[in-house]
Image (cartoon, rainbow, N blue to C red):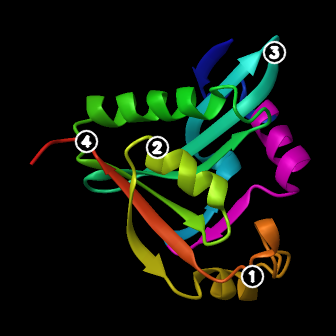
Amino acid sequence: MSIKAITIHNRDRMIQFFEEHWWSSQMIISSGIYNCDQLDGYIYEEAEEILGLLTYVFHEEALEVISLDSVQEGQGIGSKLMQAVELLAKQKGLLKITLLTTNDNLNALKFYQKRGYRIVKVIPDAVTKARAIKPSIPLIGDEGIPLHDELQLEKLLVDY
């Protein structure tokens, strides 16, 4: 097992991961339109196989996680990737980490909140607006929940 930064040497494998698992590397969220295959990030691999992938962007005082994927849930892959990006953000002197998830993603909400992330904002109809740009976004999400909104979560990296 190893966690590696995405570089020119492993970017082709990262692109293939997105195509296999998401059919596209384009992410349309309320903070922007991102081509995840061009972002910085980390891969978690075992025996040259990518089992997890995280991408991010920097903002003024924050690092925003754009995507987090694990092909083997419950094995600590997502946790290790988040630890790596939190360490990076602290080393850069950033104040917080932010991320967005959809209203149906109950597993993500549990995952992030257990790791100290707090819901700070609900963005009504963010997914509906994204669907106008990317019609392949489904109408119904996990657990049969209609997919409409985004929730912004953040974790402060400094104590006030």
Name the front one of labels 3 and 2: 2
Give the labeled residue for mark 3: 48
Magenta stretch: includes residue 9: no
Name the front one of labels 4 and 1: 1
Q: How much space separates mark 1 and mark 3, taking CA atoms?
A: 37 Å
Give the labeled residue for mark 4: 157
> Which amino acid type is shown beneath numbered disc 2?
Lys
Tell me where the magenta segment starts and ends, as one range: 13-30
Q: Residue 134 sits in which quadrant?
A: bottom right
Sequence-earlier tag: 1 or 3: 3
State the residue at coordinates (67%, 63%).
27
Q: Residue 51 sits in which quadrant?
A: top right
State the residue at coordinates (61%, 62%).
34
Asked whether the viewer can see residue 56, the reply is no
Q: Secondary structure at mark 1?
A: loop
Q: How much space separates mark 3 and mark 4, taking CA atoms?
A: 32 Å
Name the front one of labels 1 and 3: 1
Q: Secondary structure at mark 2?
A: helix
> Which amino acid type is shown beneath numbered disc 1?
Pro
Give the labeled residue for mark 1: 146
